[in-house]
Amino acid sequence: MSIFVPHFILMQMGTKITTVIFDLDGTLLDTLQDLADSTNYALRVNGLPERSVEEIRMFVGNGVRLLVERAMPDGAENPCFEQVFRDFKGHYVRNCRNKTGLYPGIDGLLCNLKEAGYRMAIVSNKLQSGVTELYRSYFAGTVEVAVGERPELQRKPAPDMVEQALRELGVSREEAVYVGDSEVDIATARNAGLPCLSVLWGFRDRDLLIREGATRLIGSPEEILVWLEQENRAGRS
């Protein structure tokens, strides 16, 4: 059985952070409007009431199936749930880049991290097909690995996706830090034994993140590289 060693102890031991594991939606990409459009399309064509963007903001984070379940009256117990879910997936695959884009400063951050020698991966509860499409469009030049929902992996907050990304990169968790925007990400990092940087530009606000146990709040992408360099200097001293 593996043993979690607190990050501050690792830094005292001189372990260097070499790897950054990123959440996708709400952390690197602002996908909210496209997710809302596809959710409301699927609800609308099945005669169900639509949801506001702010409602959908709070529904995301645990994968698209749970997003649709949360958006529907009676959730998965609704007799037309599977049809609504199919309609959502079909619409989202065709329209996942209509209004989606990188948050300001993310492109520069990824380029600077790569130039500084950091390894990077994405882990997302989004279906693997959607993660792959977005990876090819936005991240292929900087990020090495992109792990989405797969039958053989438990979704976040289980640690499986993070562990898969670390295996594909060939690095240990002692070298890695996790970056996300939600309570799901805080729990994922904890379960995987990684320190978590919680960003403030995503789908959750500061108060919620603090209530959920966030300990390192990040106000801008530029702060991530600054934090990494400070931690690594402290670990080498």
Image (cartoon, grey):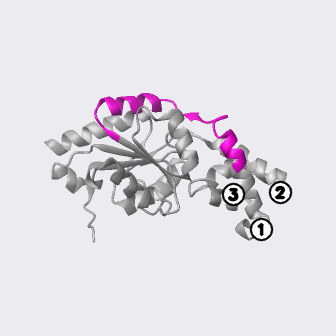
Name the residue rendered at 71%, 67% in the picture. Answer: 76
Asked which secondary structure carries label 2, the reply is: loop
Q: Does residue 175 appear left or right of residue 165 in this picture? A: left
Name the residue rendered at 35%, 29% in the picture. Answer: 112
> Cα distance, mark 1 to mark 3?
11 Å
- Depth order, front residue of 113/182: 113
Residue 199 appears anywhere in the view? yes
> Cα distance, mark 2 to mark 3?
12 Å
Mark sitting earlier along the chain (1/3): 3
Mark sitting earlier along the chain (1/2): 2
* Residue where numbered disc 2 is placed: 48
> Which quadrant: the N terminus?
bottom left
| Farthest residue, direction left | 237
Mark sitting earlier along the chain (2/3): 2
Crowding at label 2, few (<14), some or many (≥20) Cα neighbours within 10 Å? some
Crowding at label 3, few (<14), some or many (≥20) Cα neighbours within 10 Å? many
> Cα distance, mark 1 to mark 2?
11 Å
* Residue where numbered disc 1 is placed: 78
Asked which secondary structure carries label 3, the reply is: helix
Instruction: Where is residue 55? Give x, y as percent.
Output: 69, 52
Amino acid bearing label 3: Val
Amino acid bearing label 2: Leu
Q: Which residues are magenta?
A: 90-119
